[in-house]
Amino acid sequence: MAEEDFLVTLRYALWFLVFTAAIVSYRVVFGPTLADRVVALNTATTKVVVMVAILSVVLNAYYLLDVAIVLLMVNAVGGLIIAKYLEVGR
Amino acid sequence: MIEFALLAFGLFIMLFGALGLIRFPDVYTRLHATAKCDTGGAMSILLALAVSVDAPAVVRFKFILLAFLIALINPMLSHAIARGAYKRGIKPKVVVDMYAGNNP
C-alpha cells in the first residue's frame, strides 16, 4: 500500500486514463484507413496496460502486474502480425 | 513528492498524445504523436508507481521491468506499422518524401 493521498490521486488518474482511452477510440471507429485503426488500437492497449498496473496498486493485488506484462507481450505479437499483413497484403 | 510530479507529467503527456492522434492529418504524423507520447507517459507513470509503492522488492522490479518492456516494444511496433503502411501504398501528406527514392 502506498500512502493515502497518493492512493486517492491514483483513483482520479485511473478515470483520467479511461477518458483518454475514450478519446483514442474515436480513431478506432472512424479511422479512414486500416493503419490508423492499428495505431489507435496499440495506443489504447498501452493505456490499458498502465491502467492495470495502477489498479494493482489501488486494489493491493500485485498479481495483476503479471496480467499487465502478458497483455503487453500479446499486444507486441499481434501488432507485428497486423503490420506484416499491411506489408504483404494477404 | 517526486511521485506526484512523475504521475502528473505522465498523465499530461498521455492526454497530449491522444489529442495528437485525433487532430493530425496523416498516419505517419499520428504515429509521430502517439509513439513518443505513449512511451514516455507510460514509463513516467510506471516509475512513479515503482517509487511510491510499499511492497517487497519483487514488485518494484516488476514495475521497472514493465517500463523497460514498454520502452523496447512500443518503438518497434510503431516502426513496423509505419513500414507496413508505406509498403501498402499510403502516401504521406508532405512536400518532400525522402523515403520514396528507395521504394518506387
Image: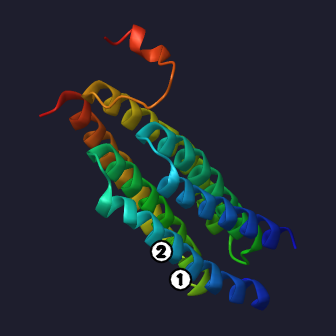
Most foreground residue, A53 or B34:
B34
Give the labeled residue for mark 1. A61
User: How has the structure been colored for display?
Assistant: rainbow
Which residue does the image show at 49% across and 27% down from the upper left? B94
Residue A13 visible (yes or no): yes
- The three-letter amino acid code for the residue at tag 1 is Ala
Q: Quadrant of residue B41?
A: bottom right
User: Residue A71: x, y in percent?
Assistant: 39, 61
Give the farthest residue toward the right.
Answer: B1
Which residue does the image show at 39% across and 34% down from the upper left? B80
Residue A1 visible (yes or no): no
User: Residue A1: x, y in percent?
Assistant: 69, 85
Which residue does the image show at 50% across and 48% down from the upper left? B24
Disc 2 residue crowd, few under 14, some 14–19, many 20+, Cα 10 Å: some
**The disc label shown at residue A64, or none:** 2
Give the farthest residue toward the left.
Answer: A90
Residue B31 falls left or right of residue B53: left
Most foreground residue, B27 or A77:
B27
Residue B48 falls left or right of residue B25: right
Helix, strand or loop for disc 2: helix
Give the farthest residue toward the top.
Answer: B101
Q: Quadrant of the N terminus of chain B?
A: bottom right
Which residue does the image show at 55% across and 53% down from the upper left? B20
User: Residue A88: x, y in percent?
Assistant: 19, 28
Tell me the chain of label 2.
Answer: A
Vertical comparison of A23 with A38: above or below = below
User: Residue A58: x, y in percent?
Assistant: 60, 85
Disc 1 residue crowd, few under 14, some 14–19, many 20+, Cα 10 Å: few
Q: Quadrant of the C terminus of chain B?
A: top left
CA–CA distance between discs 1 and 2?
6 Å
Tell me the chain of label 1.
Answer: A
- The three-letter amino acid code for the residue at tag 2 is Leu
